[in-house]
Image (cartoon, helix red, strand yellow):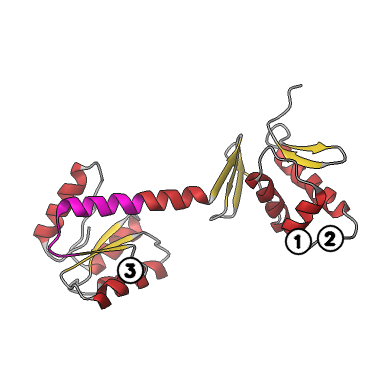
Amino acid sequence: MVDDEQAIVDTVATALEYEGFVVDTALSGAAALASMKVRPPDLGVLDVMLPDVNGVDLTKRLREEGIMVPILFLSARDTMEDKVAGPGAGGDDYVSKPFALVEIVARVNAILRRVVLEADANVHRFENLEMNDTAHEIRRGGVIVELTATEYSILRYFMLNPRRVLSKPQILNYVWHYDFGGDSNIVETHISTLRKKLDAHGPPLIHTKRLVGYILSEPTSA
């Protein structure tokens, strides 16, 4: 919570703490930046008119520092230009002063719900296998599995279509983005190496359906 008025900082922080949030506070942009570098928050509530820096400029600085925290702007300025400037600088929402505390709490909760939903949309899971598209990372049983770009693309196709048989032409079209009329052994080769990497951390998940294709499904019983 960042504002140059101590009373506003204390009031908003208390309201958010009452809702179960842990709140760090600052009275200037410099103090906020220093605090966020040490402990990046899940969300920032910033006054647009800070004594040392414009809140919009502070948000840009945070992005430059790699601190991609969602931002809720607060300001007594209520022009359309201000409301456009906030989101344009990376802000996620804008509330004009004077405001009701219940509105601040509601906006904070709404932003955090959206952030969680967006994060979940970029994470795919099957059994103990997890694919994070944002980090471009694969984990099996919590262990990172290093894949090539092609192997990642193939696995992503399987993760988007679990328990569904995928033919070689379908895989070729998805990964290489064209109808492949040549030797389909390229699919077998990449799936073979993909399987070895995944199977090193657990029972097989990619199974061959003879004369049909491949399927991502639960491990078969011995």
Q: Where is residue 105 in the image (x, y as percent from the top left)?
A: 23, 50
Q: Do the residues labelled 1 and 2 touch (CB within 8 Å)?
A: yes
Give residue 180's mark: 2
Q: Is residue 194 in view?
A: yes
Q: Residue at 24% across / 74% down in the picture?
A: 53
Q: In this view, does 26 lie above or below 126?
A: below
- Dot 2: what SS? loop
Separation (CA) of disc 1 from disc 2: 8 Å
Q: Where is residue 217 in the image (x, y as percent from the top left)?
A: 69, 35
Name the N-terminal-most of marks 3 and 1. 3
According to the image, label 1 marks what residue? 176
Quarter of the rendering containing residue 84: bottom left
**Image quarter hosting the N terminus:** bottom left
Category of crowding for the residue at label 2, using alpha-carbon neighbours closer than 10 angstroms: few (below 14), some (14–19), many (at least 20): some
* Residue range of the region highlighted in magenta in the rendering: 96-112
Give residue 59's mark: 3
Magenta-span inclusion, residue 108: yes
15 or 102: nearer the viewer? 102
Q: Where is residue 219 in the image (x, y as percent from the top left)?
A: 71, 29
